[in-house]
Protein backbone atom coordinates (compact mmCIF):
# COMPACT_ATOMS: atom_id res chain seq x y z
CA UNK A 1 0.00 0.00 0.00
CA UNK A 2 1.31 3.45 -0.82
CA UNK A 3 0.06 6.99 -0.32
CA UNK A 4 -1.56 8.37 -3.45
CA UNK A 5 0.87 10.37 -5.55
CA UNK A 6 3.95 9.20 -3.63
CA UNK A 7 5.93 6.41 -5.24
CA UNK A 8 8.04 4.13 -3.05
CA UNK A 9 11.77 4.97 -3.17
CA UNK A 10 13.73 3.03 -5.76
CA UNK A 11 16.78 1.11 -4.53
CA UNK A 12 16.18 2.17 -0.96
CA UNK A 13 18.23 0.95 1.97
CA UNK A 14 15.78 -1.03 4.12
CA UNK A 15 16.65 -1.90 7.71
CA UNK A 16 13.52 -3.64 8.91
CA UNK A 17 10.46 -5.22 7.40
CA UNK A 18 6.95 -4.30 8.49
CA UNK A 19 3.92 -6.50 8.87
CA UNK A 20 0.74 -6.13 6.81
CA UNK A 21 -0.87 -2.71 7.31
CA UNK A 22 -3.81 -2.46 9.66
CA UNK A 23 -5.37 0.85 8.62
CA UNK A 24 -3.58 3.37 6.45
CA UNK A 25 -3.96 6.83 7.97
CA UNK A 26 -4.94 9.47 5.48
CA UNK A 27 -2.19 12.02 4.95
CA UNK A 28 -3.15 15.61 5.58
CA UNK A 29 0.30 17.16 5.30
CA UNK A 30 1.72 16.72 1.80
CA UNK A 31 4.28 18.97 0.12
CA UNK A 32 5.23 19.16 -3.57
CA UNK A 33 8.70 17.92 -2.62
CA UNK A 34 7.27 14.52 -1.69
CA UNK A 35 7.05 14.82 2.08
CA UNK A 36 4.00 13.11 3.62
CA UNK A 37 3.16 13.29 7.34
CA UNK A 38 0.03 11.60 8.73
CA UNK A 39 -2.21 13.47 11.18
CA UNK A 40 -1.10 13.29 14.79
CA UNK A 41 2.58 12.83 13.87
CA UNK A 42 5.20 15.50 14.48
CA UNK A 43 8.86 15.53 13.38
CA UNK A 44 11.56 17.43 15.27
CA UNK A 45 15.11 17.76 13.98
CA UNK A 46 18.52 19.32 14.49
CA UNK A 47 21.68 19.31 12.43
CA UNK A 48 25.44 19.49 12.49
CA UNK A 49 27.67 20.08 9.49
CA UNK A 50 27.99 16.35 8.87
CA UNK A 51 24.72 14.84 10.15
CA UNK A 52 21.04 15.17 10.98
CA UNK A 53 19.12 14.06 14.07
CA UNK A 54 15.39 13.39 13.73
CA UNK A 55 12.67 12.33 16.11
CA UNK A 56 9.34 11.18 14.69
CA UNK A 57 6.76 11.40 17.47
CA UNK A 58 4.56 8.29 17.32
CA UNK A 59 2.85 6.98 20.44
CA UNK A 60 3.88 3.41 21.30
CA UNK A 61 5.04 2.46 17.78
CA UNK A 62 5.07 -1.22 16.80
CA UNK A 63 6.27 -3.14 13.75
CA UNK A 64 8.57 -0.25 12.90
CA UNK A 65 10.31 -0.16 9.54
CA UNK A 66 12.77 2.51 8.40
CA UNK A 67 14.31 2.89 4.96
CA UNK A 68 16.33 5.58 3.20
CA UNK A 69 18.06 6.31 -0.09
CA UNK A 70 21.15 8.30 -0.98
CA UNK A 71 18.85 10.72 -2.81
CA UNK A 72 17.41 11.76 0.55
CA UNK A 73 14.13 9.81 0.58
CA UNK A 74 13.32 8.56 4.08
CA UNK A 75 10.37 6.30 4.94
CA UNK A 76 9.19 5.47 8.47
CA UNK A 77 6.33 2.97 8.84
CA UNK A 78 4.80 1.97 12.17
CA UNK A 79 1.62 0.67 13.77
CA UNK A 80 0.14 2.93 16.44
CA UNK A 81 -3.30 2.94 18.02
CA UNK A 82 -4.58 0.38 15.49
CA UNK A 83 -3.42 2.48 12.56
CA UNK A 84 -0.63 1.98 10.06
CA UNK A 85 1.30 5.24 9.86
CA UNK A 86 3.50 5.99 6.86
CA UNK A 87 5.82 8.98 7.13
CA UNK A 88 7.66 10.07 3.99
CA UNK A 89 10.40 12.69 4.04
CA UNK A 90 12.15 14.03 0.98
CA UNK A 91 15.22 15.61 2.50
CA UNK A 92 16.74 18.85 1.29
CA UNK A 93 19.88 17.15 -0.03
CA UNK A 94 21.66 13.81 -0.33
CA UNK A 95 22.66 11.50 2.50
CA UNK A 96 24.74 8.35 2.92
CA UNK A 97 21.92 5.83 3.38
CA UNK A 98 24.32 3.06 4.43
CA UNK A 99 25.10 5.01 7.63
CA UNK A 100 21.49 5.59 8.66
CA UNK A 101 20.82 4.50 12.25
CA UNK A 102 17.52 4.45 14.14
CA UNK A 103 15.93 3.36 17.39
CA UNK A 104 12.30 3.05 18.49
CA UNK A 105 10.85 3.80 21.92
CA UNK A 106 7.45 4.42 23.43
CA UNK A 107 7.66 8.05 22.33
CA UNK A 108 8.54 7.47 18.71
CA UNK A 109 11.40 6.78 16.31
CA UNK A 110 14.80 8.53 16.49
CA UNK A 111 17.09 8.64 13.45
CA UNK A 112 20.69 9.65 12.84
CA UNK A 113 21.44 10.47 9.19
CA UNK A 114 24.85 11.23 7.68
CA UNK A 115 25.06 13.95 5.07
CA UNK A 116 26.79 13.11 1.82
CA UNK A 117 28.51 16.49 1.79
CA UNK A 118 29.64 18.61 4.74
CA UNK A 119 27.63 21.78 5.26
CA UNK A 120 24.58 23.28 6.90
CA UNK A 121 21.17 22.86 5.27
CA UNK A 122 19.10 25.15 7.51
CA UNK A 123 15.99 23.29 6.30
CA UNK A 124 15.10 19.61 6.58
CA UNK A 125 12.98 18.83 3.55
CA UNK A 126 12.76 19.91 -0.07
CA UNK A 127 9.89 22.18 -1.02
CA UNK A 128 7.56 23.76 1.51
CA UNK A 129 8.20 22.67 5.12
CA UNK A 130 5.00 21.29 6.71
CA UNK A 131 3.85 22.86 9.97
CA UNK A 132 4.37 19.50 11.68
CA UNK A 133 8.15 19.68 11.16
CA UNK A 134 9.86 21.69 13.91
CA UNK A 135 13.45 22.48 14.85
CA UNK A 136 14.52 20.80 18.10
CA UNK A 137 15.90 23.90 19.81
CA UNK A 138 17.07 21.87 22.81
CA UNK A 139 19.64 20.22 20.53
CA UNK A 140 20.40 23.28 18.39
CA UNK A 141 24.02 24.36 18.00
CA UNK A 142 25.02 27.15 15.63
CA UNK A 143 28.02 26.96 13.32
CA UNK A 144 30.31 29.00 15.59
CA UNK A 145 29.53 26.82 18.60
CA UNK A 146 30.10 23.71 16.51
CA UNK A 147 33.53 24.96 15.40
CA UNK A 148 34.50 25.78 18.99
CA UNK A 149 33.37 22.35 20.15
CA UNK A 150 35.70 20.74 17.60
CA UNK A 151 38.62 23.02 18.50
CA UNK A 152 38.08 22.69 22.26
CA UNK A 153 36.37 19.33 22.82
CA UNK A 154 36.85 19.68 26.60
CA UNK A 155 35.60 23.26 26.69
CA UNK A 156 37.09 25.99 28.86
CA UNK A 157 36.16 24.45 32.19
CA UNK A 158 39.24 24.26 34.45
CA UNK A 159 38.28 20.94 35.98
CA UNK A 160 37.66 19.38 32.56
CA UNK A 161 41.01 20.67 31.29
CA UNK A 162 42.78 19.32 34.37
CA UNK A 163 41.21 15.92 33.73
CA UNK A 164 42.15 16.00 30.06
CA UNK A 165 45.74 17.16 30.59
CA UNK A 166 46.63 15.16 33.69
CA UNK A 167 47.03 15.76 37.39
CA UNK A 168 50.09 18.01 36.91
CA UNK A 169 48.18 20.50 34.75
CA UNK A 170 48.61 23.95 36.23
CA UNK A 171 51.32 22.79 38.65
CA UNK A 172 53.70 25.56 37.49
CA UNK A 173 51.11 28.11 38.61
CA UNK A 174 50.81 26.42 42.00
CA UNK A 175 54.59 26.35 42.39
CA UNK A 176 54.83 30.07 41.57
CA UNK A 177 52.23 30.93 44.19
CA UNK A 178 54.00 28.78 46.79
CA UNK A 179 57.32 30.50 46.03
CA UNK A 180 55.75 33.95 46.48
CA UNK A 181 54.32 32.94 49.87
CA UNK A 182 57.68 31.58 50.99
CA UNK A 183 59.45 34.76 49.93
CA UNK A 184 56.94 36.89 51.82
CA UNK A 185 57.50 34.80 54.96
CA UNK A 186 61.28 35.35 55.07
CA UNK A 187 61.18 39.05 54.08
CA UNK A 188 61.76 40.91 57.39
CA UNK A 189 61.80 44.44 55.96
CA UNK A 190 58.88 46.76 56.49
CA UNK A 191 57.54 49.12 53.84
CA UNK A 192 57.73 52.19 56.18
CA UNK A 193 61.44 51.74 56.96
CA UNK A 194 64.00 53.80 55.06
CA UNK A 195 66.61 51.88 53.16
CA UNK A 196 69.99 51.80 54.93
CA UNK A 197 72.86 53.27 52.93
CA UNK A 198 75.79 50.91 52.50
CA UNK A 199 79.15 52.24 51.47
CA UNK A 200 81.59 50.09 49.60
CA UNK A 201 85.38 50.77 49.57
Image (tube, grey):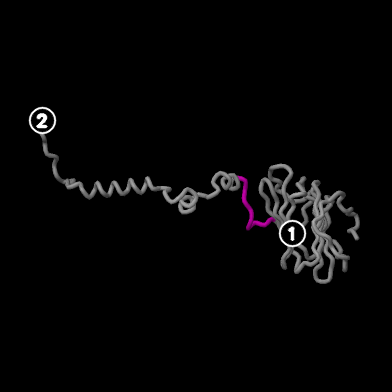
Side of 19 relative to 192 (left or right) = right
Mark 1: few, some, or many residues within 10 Å (few <14, many ≥20)? many
Q: Which mark, by number, is residue 43?
A: 1
Q: Quadrant of the C terminus?
A: top left
Q: Quadrant of the N terminus?
A: bottom right
- Which corner quadrant of the image does residue 37 belong to? bottom right
Q: Nearer the viewer, residue 152 or 32?
A: 152
Residue shown at the point (83%, 60%) measured from the top left: 17
Q: Secondary structure at mark 1?
A: strand
Q: Nearer the viewer, residue 15 or 53?
A: 15
Residue shown at the point (91%, 57%) measured from the top left: 4
Q: Is residue 138 magenta?
A: yes
Residue shown at the point (72%, 46%) measured from the top left: 115
Q: Can residue 43 be seen?
A: yes
- Which corner quadrant of the image does residue 111 belong to? bottom right
Q: Is residue 10 magenta?
A: no
Calculate the distance from the C-alpha at mark 1 to the C-alpha at mark 2: 88 Å
The region drawn magenta spans 135-143
Image coordinates of residue 50 in percent, x first then y, are 68, 46
Side of 78 relative to 139 (left or right) = right
Q: Secondary structure at mark 2?
A: loop
Side of 72 relative to 195 (left or right) = right
Residue closest to the far front: 167
Q: How many marks?
A: 2
Q: To which residue does mark 2 refer?
A: 200
Amino acid sequence: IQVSGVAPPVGRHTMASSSAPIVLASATSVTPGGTVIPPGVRVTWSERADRLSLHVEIAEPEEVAVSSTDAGAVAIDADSDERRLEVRLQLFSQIDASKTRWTASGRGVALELSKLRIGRWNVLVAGVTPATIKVDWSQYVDEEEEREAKLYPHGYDTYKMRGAMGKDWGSNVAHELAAQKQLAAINTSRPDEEDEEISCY
